[in-house]
Amino acid sequence: MVMIAKRLVTVIPTLIGVVIVTFLLTRVLPGDPAVYFAGPAATPQSIAEIRKSLGLDRPLPDQFARYVNDLAHGNFGNSLSTGRPVATELSSRLPASAELTLSGLFLAIVIAVPLGIFAAVKQGSLIDHLCRMVATAGVSLPVFFTGLLLVYIFYFQLGWSPAPIGRLDAFATAPPDITGFYLIDSLVTGDLETFRAALGQLILPAATLAVFSLAPITRMTRASMLAVLSSEFIRTARASGLSSRTVILTYAFRNAMLPVVTTLGMVFSFLLGANVLVEKVFAWPGIGSYAVEALLQSDFAPVQGFVLTMAVLYVVLNLLIDLLYGVIDPRVRLEA
């Protein structure tokens, strides 16, 4: 508990800095919301009235004080383009982004971790060279290019994938809102048709994110396993007559997990940013596409809410990683 309290104390200055930077950035971005919503035929007088109604005619310190006061009351403001509260929009779209990000990360872990272990155990072999090729390809390909390439191959050419039009195709209906994750909600309610439809729509965007995150996970798993396999306690375990499976999975991999977990945390934060491009490519109704549409319309409130949500998620993720360190290696708890 002491370690959690210390981490939470260090988080406060970070969140304050995010609030200040987000507010200032949205004010220096090109475009005037009043001009946009007044329309091309608006007169200067009507534009001035809209600017006054939005509070944009006030000095920046006054606007910032009002913004902080709204945040303290849990109010992210209203979206000018949709007219709905930003908090409502984000809460309704966040499960879509979370389902996509977690699916991509899970798929990457399932492929990258075994590949990194085999590459370390069979150093210099064909699988080791395959590991390097995968890492190079994952780093070299931009995430939006990978998404478009997968759509072109599996939808336009082969016809194996459904149209990239969101979380469900035109013939499926959304399951009851239990967790917000369509795969889980459809399984809980026993709706296998919706589950298959949601899974079909999820495969390509999740694979796009998985390709993007394969490289760092694979390389870190391989490097960490190589360092542990050359340790003295591994040689002692082999000399004791333990099987290779026991030595590699029980002793080597557990001691190699800390750098891998750190990398997973970094990759997850990267995926939250990459989601913005993937959601636009696949018309995914997440918070990333919502923020991009608001940015194009000079709608400040959704952009600010998006950045703050990402900052909070990143802070929570780092806290969970610190707690996971203590589970993997008890010495971390003792040092804390």
Image (cartoon, rainbow, N blue to C red):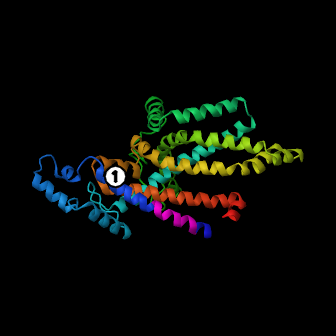
Quick check: can you spot residue 65?
Answer: yes
- Which one is in front, 87 or 197? 87
Residue depicted at 54% across the width and 36% down the height: 139
Residue 286 visible? no
Q: Main secondary structure of the magenta part?
A: helix
For label 1, the residue is 25
Q: State the residue in front, 216 or 247.
A: 216
Where is residue 147 shown, x and y percent of the image?
Answer: 46, 37
- Identify which residue is drawn at 66% across, 30% down: 129
Residue at x-position 44% and y-position 31%: 152
Across and down, in percent, residue 334 comes to 70, 64
What residue sits 22% from the left and 62% below the top? 58
Left or right of 252 in this view: 82:
left
Give percent across and percent down for residue 137.
55, 32
The magenta stretch spans residue 82: no
Residue 149 pos. (x, y %):
46, 32
Q: Which residues fall within the magenta stretch?
A: 5-14
